[in-house]
Amino acid sequence: MWGRLGPSARCRTRRYNLGTFTCPTWLAPAGGKIYVGYGCQTGKGKLGSIDVRGATPVVALDLPLDGEYYYPPLLRSTPADPNLLLLVDRSSVSFPISGRPILYDVSSGTPSHVASLAGSACTGLHDAALTTDKVILACSYLWDPQTNSRVAATEHVAYSTTDLSPAGAYPSGTWPTAVTTSPGGSFVILGSSESDSIHVARPDGTPVRRYDLPPGDHLEVRGLAVSADSRTLYVVTTDQDRKNPALRVLTDFTTTGSSLLLSAPATSTRTAPVTVRGTVAFAGASVSTPRTLRVVKQDLTGSHPLPDVTTSADGSFSFSDTPLVGGANTYTVTFPGDSTQPATSQSATVQVSRAATALSITAKATHGRRATVTAQLGTTYTNRTVCLYAQPYGSSRRTLTCRAVDAYGKLTATYRTYQRVTFSASFAGDERYAPAEVSQRMYGFLPKPGMFRGY
């Protein structure tokens, strides 16, 4: 069950001085030492260590690394291989610097390069975890060699700790942002920002449980941790404005539950068939008989129940649908539960293409410091509403009018102006035509007929 914790007391038992202006940021135990990712200056992330095994702690800074780190490197280690240390040069979605995960062997006390991953493989690298034999990454975007471009990630990707070769993936939702493991390595916990859900799986990928966050809550980046006894899962969330962080507690994350995984194309063409595939699974029990699942589609026109789908004996299933409405088509599949297994549901969204419509705007100055603004809308399906706006220089945008165009596709408004102003027209789109917006800037007005004053 979910709980919420308030502030708690903290107790400091020991302090180690790394010197001034070091900005220690990340810690990880490995090779009998405590390793520190630090660095105050952008572009100068560094690695240090603290050896506390002797009577006097030994601090070593600026350890030799393979290449440069933009930020203080994020550090990850695992008790399963205590001499292995993972360094990650974190990246962001808006500024896609190289994520560049690198594995080091620290058994000798000096980091020795084991393997590294190309920076282009993962953009928006927010978190990482180590298991007995895998490096698991939470990346917002992955490199698609078929299209030679970045694509939004819908799963946490895994790589071998031997040489960082591909080692499968963990389906978890769009834009993975957090991943951790239980201390004993029996469970992998994954979270994604787009789905705002928590997925618990075995290291081999077998799903255990899925938890949806309370409405309005969002999972924070690197917002997952497991207690030392592997009994409690801690989740850091924020509200719908990404503010007011809260610590939530899940006390039964390893118990038996139902899980449902879906896969669907990210995009499709309107009136073209879309196939959704998935699997229903039960933790601690195999799916040995077919199960009936409910399917609902949500599009711009509302919610539409689709025919139930029956799984095969192993829990796998697929169904097809032909979207007639463009925009986001979200398919929600629900296992209603039974006497032995709890209910669960999962959603997948397909962005269906819409045609472009013609939209133009003209603005003409008239005398008396007035302007006549006219929008011209082309062919649409059901929506004929256009909104006209004016944004004076240095001011916020204001609405002039928002209504249906006339029989000729025109909408006109007047505006009294004393300075340069930007006029814009917007069409919100409909089931078959995509949204559109155009603008035009005006630099002057007519004080009286025949005289033009410009700015």
Image: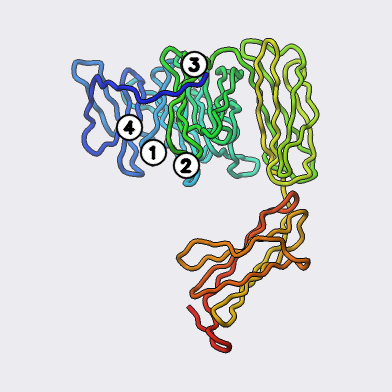
Decide which of tag 2 and tag 3 comes sooner along the chain.
Answer: 2
Q: Can residue 314 be seen in this view?
A: yes
Decide which of tag 1 and tag 4 comes sooner along the chain.
Answer: 4
Decide which of tag 3 and tag 4 comes sooner along the chain.
Answer: 4
**What kind of element bears circle 4?**
strand
Which mark lies nearer to you, 2 or 3? 3
Q: Mark 4 points at which residue?
A: 47
Report, in whole angstroms, how far the alpha carbon at label 1 lies from the one at label 3: 42 Å
Report, in whole angstroms, how far the alpha carbon at label 4 lies from the one at label 2: 21 Å
**What kind of element bears circle 2?**
loop
- Residue 333 position, x and y percent, is 70, 28
Q: Residue furthest bottom?
A: 450
Q: How crowded is mark 1: few (under 14 residues within 10 Å), some or many (20 or more)?
A: few
Q: What residue type is labelled 3?
A: Thr
Q: Is residue 116 visible?
A: no
Q: What residue type is labelled 4?
A: Leu
Q: Residues within 10 Å of mark 2 (few under 14, many from 20)?
A: some
Task: Between residue 44 and residue 40, name the one nearer to us.
Answer: 40
